[in-house]
Amino acid sequence: MTIESTSVKNTEKDALQDKSNIEKIEKYLKGNIFPSEKKHLIECANKNTAPKYFLDDLNKLKDKKYENNSEIMKDIYN
């Protein structure tokens, strides 16, 4: 396997992981209205019966207003 093909596989893997992460955020934060503060994101996730690992991730977020799901994903997964 060449370095180039390994790099392409890693890029594809990253893209699939990003898609999975945004799907989780959309599922567990369904009904959330933006902009939204961290505490409201956690309340929404609880209402949507998010698993503990997702709630733990939300608790690690900065105390600020989030404008959209992409901003949340960036802070959680990067």
Image: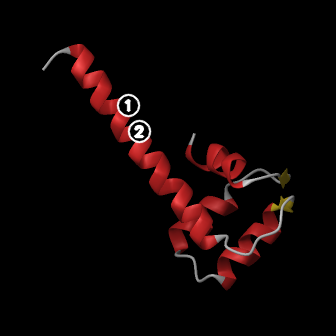
Q: Residue furthest left?
A: 1
Identify the residue at image location x=69%, y=55%: 69
The x and y percentages for residue 63 are 83, 54
Identify the residue at image location x=61%, y=69%: 55
Identify the residue at image location x=43%, y=41%: 15
Q: Choose between 56 and 72: the one closer to the eye.
A: 72
Mark number displayed over residue 11: 1
Neighbours of disc 2 within 10 Å: few (<14), some (14-19), many (20+): few
The x and y percentages for residue 26 are 61, 65
Compared with 66, 23 (above or below) is below
Q: Please state which amino acid type lies under the numbered disc 1.
A: Thr
- For the N terminus, the quadrant is top left
Task: Tell me how far mark 1 sits from mark 2, CA to CA.
Answer: 5 Å
Q: In the picture provided, is 43 more to the left or to the right than 9?
A: right
Q: In the picture provided, is 30 more to the left or to the right than 20?
A: right
Mark number displayed over residue 75: none
Neighbours of disc 1 within 10 Å: few (<14), some (14-19), many (20+): few
Is label 1 in a helix, a strand or a loop? helix
Q: Choose between 8 and 57: the one closer to the eye.
A: 8
Q: Choose between 56 and 51: the one closer to the eye.
A: 51
- For the C terminus, the quadrant is top right
The x and y percentages for residue 42 are 72, 71
Q: Please state which amino acid type lies under the numbered disc 2.
A: Asp
Colour scheme in use: secondary structure
Is label 2 in a helix, a strand or a loop? helix
The answer to whether mark 1 and mark 2 are in CB contact below 8 A is: yes
Q: Which residue is mark 2?
A: 14
Instruction: State the count of labels.
Output: 2
Compared with 46, 11 (above or below) is above
